[in-house]
Image: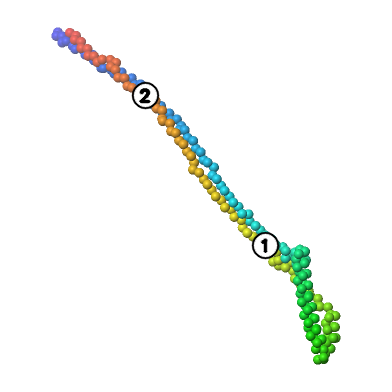
Amino acid sequence: MLRIPQLTMQATFAQLSIIVERGYMNMLQPQADMSLEQPQPQVEMKTTPPRLTIDQTEAWADVDLKHIFRRIEEAAQDGYASWLSYLETTAIQGDELMRIEQGGDVLAMQAEANSERPPFDYNVGLIPRPFSVKVSFEPGHINMNWQTSNARIHIEPRPVQIDYKPNVVHIDLARHNNLRIDVTV
């Protein structure tokens, strides 16, 4: 029998070893130093208060509650008016007596006129009279003056702190490729 040699092949493939070292990145952002100062505004106010004036003088006078100076003034005016009236009456009666010779009963008429009282003067009305109280109003005012200042801002930034290590990949040949051929007869 004829023997034919046999070939036996055994192949081992190459094998790679990949080791990855992970990188990292850390970032730290420190806060910036910041100062803020806002000066107080200056406010200047000038006020004129409102004024309400109520004058009741005439209302009090209507109910005969008068100041002494007013009573004196009214008495003086009444006295002056009475004196003028007396002068007028005396002058008229004197003229009538001058013409007594013209006839008529002048003395009797003058005696009757001088003996009668003047007619009583009366009137119906409201006390105090309407609108005898005087009211006036002056509105108030406010003048404001503002002086503002700008804010003073100071910012000092701080740089970012970065700690960085990149990924590292190690590639090695863990096993070499191999081809083994055996011949058997």
Few, some or many residues within 10 Å of mark 1 (<14, 14–19, 20+): few
**What residue is drawn where x is 56% and y is 47%?**
43
User: Which labelled disc corresponds to residue 44?
Assistant: none
For mark 1, what is the residue? 135
Question: Could you tell me residue 94's position as x and y percent?
Answer: 80, 84
Nearer to us of marks 1 and 2 is: 1
| Mark-to-mark CA distance, 1 and 2 | 91 Å
Residue 129 visible, this orientation:
yes
**What residue is drawn where x is 45% and y is 30%?**
30
**Within the image, what quadrant is residue 73 found in?**
bottom right
Please determine whether, in this image, residue 3 is positioned above or below residue 19.
above
In the rendered image, the quadrant that contains the C terminus is top left
**Within the image, what quadrant is residue 99 found in?**
bottom right
Residue 12 visible, this orientation:
no
Question: Could you tell me residue 128's position as x and y percent?
Answer: 74, 66
Give the residue furthest to the bottom: 102
For mark 2, what is the residue? 165
In the rendered image, the quadrant that contains the N terminus is top left
Camera-nearest residue between 26 and 51? 51
As helix, strand or loop, the secondary structure at mark 2 comes to: strand
Question: Could you tell me residue 17's position as x and y percent?
Answer: 31, 18
**What residue is drawn where x is 59% and y is 55%?**
141
As helix, strand or loop, the secondary structure at mark 1 comes to: strand
Q: Which badge, 1 or 2, is on the more N-terminal residue?
A: 1
Please determine whether, in this image, residue 19 is positioned above or below residue 58.
above
Camera-nearest residue between 11 and 133? 133
Camera-nearest residue between 62 and 70? 70
**What residue is drawn where x is 63% and y is 54%?**
49
**Within the image, what quadrant is residue 53 found in?**
bottom right
Query: The disc labelled 2 sits on which kind of residue?
Result: Lys
Question: Could you tell me residue 174's position as x and y percent?
Answer: 29, 16
Query: The disc labelled 1 sits on which kind of residue?
Result: Val
